[in-house]
Amino acid sequence: MNHMKEWLKAAGIRAVRTFAESALAYIGTSAAVLGDVNWLGVLSAGAFGAVSALLLALTGLPEAEK
């Protein structure tokens, strides 16, 4: 049970970081000024990155392995 908590925490942290990285990359490539940002696209790209990170975490997380 303790290993599952550790894995969930590590996977969650990785998913949040990947969300932020994906959203930032989308913002950086889509607009020159803040008003031109397609925020729905930013959230979509971030969500896709987070889901991808969680799915990849199923194969193993080095930070959660002992």
Image: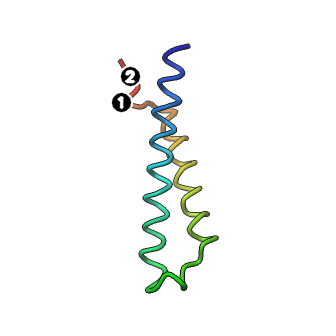
Q: Could you tell me which quadrant the N terminus lies in?
A: top right
Compared to residue 59, the image places residue 41 above or below, namely below
Compared to residue 31, the image places residue 55 above or below, namely above
Identify the secondary structure beneath mark 2: loop
Q: Are marks 1 and 2 in contact (CB under 8 Å)?
A: yes
Residue under the point 53% across and 22% down:
5
Q: Amino acid at mark 2?
A: Glu
* Furthest-top residue in this view: 1
Residue under the point 46% across and 57% down:
20
Image location (x, y in percent) of residue 32 = 43, 86
Image location (x, y in percent) of residue 65 = 38, 22
Between the C-alphas of marks 1 and 2, the distance is: 5 Å
Q: Could you tell me which quadrant the C terminus lies in?
A: top left
Compared to residue 31, the image places residue 47 above or below, namely above
Name the colour scheme. rainbow
Q: Amino acid at mark 1?
A: Pro
CA neighbours of label 2 inside 10 A, class few (<14), some (14 to 19), many (20+) = few
Write down the quadrant of residue 28 in the picture: bottom left
Q: Across the whole image, how many numbered discs are drawn on residues?
A: 2
Residue under the point 49% across and 64% down:
23
Image location (x, y in percent) of residue 26 = 48, 70
Q: Which mark is residue 12?
A: none
The answer to whether residue 62 is left or right of residue 57 is left
Dot 1 corresponds to which residue? 62
Identify the secondary structure beneath mark 1: helix
The answer to whether residue 47 is left or right of residue 34 is right
Q: Which mark is residue 65?
A: 2
CA neighbours of label 1 inside 10 A, class few (<14), some (14 to 19), many (20+) = few
